[in-house]
Amino acid sequence: MTSYSIIKVGNDYVVQANDKCILKVGSRRRAAQLISEATGLLNALAVVQSPDISAEAPSLQRETPELP
């Protein structure tokens, strides 16, 4: 899980993810909104991905056709 924080640098606000600066914006409200949106997108992505399904093995085996 990513830890987000907002720090003030001069007149701007810097968004950090795990202590790495990733974005600089002009208002604290916009920084908080972007963190909220990013968290929502990452949570939605986690629901879509399923580690139990393997892309390597097909779910159904192909049957060999019978020749007359």
Image (cartoon, rainbow, N blue to C red):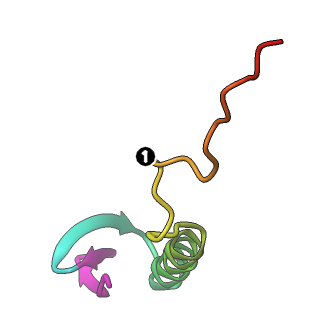
Looking at the image, residue 43 lies above or below residue 5: above
User: In which quadrant of the rendered view does residue 13 lie?
Assistant: bottom left
Question: What is the residue that sits farthest to the front in this orientation?
Answer: 68
User: Would residue 54 be found to the left or right of residue 6 on screen?
Assistant: right
Q: Position of residue 59 (x, y in %)?
A: 60, 53
Question: What is the residue that sits farthest to the top in this orientation?
Answer: 68
Q: Nearer the viewer, residue 3 or 52?
A: 52
- Read off the magenta span: 1-17
**Mark 1 crowdedness (10 Å alpha carbons): few <14, some 14-19, many ≥20:** few
Question: What is the residue that sits farthest to the left in this orientation?
Answer: 19
Image quadrant containing the C terminus = top right
Q: Secondary structure at mark 1?
A: loop
User: In which quadrant of the rendered view does residue 40 lie?
Assistant: bottom right
Q: Residue at x 53, y 66 (%)?
A: 49
Q: Residue at x 33, y 66 (%)?
A: 24
Magenta region includes residue 7: yes
User: Would residue 13 be found to the left or right of residue 28 on screen?
Assistant: left
Q: Position of residue 16 (x, y in %)?
A: 26, 77
Q: What secondary structure predominates along the stretch shown in magenta?
A: strand
Q: Position of residue 43 (x, y in %)?
A: 53, 79
Q: Residue at x 66, y 27 (%)?
A: 64
Question: What is the residue that sits farthest to the right in this orientation?
Answer: 68
Residue type marked 1: Glu
According to the picture, the residue beneath numbered tag 1 turns out to be 56
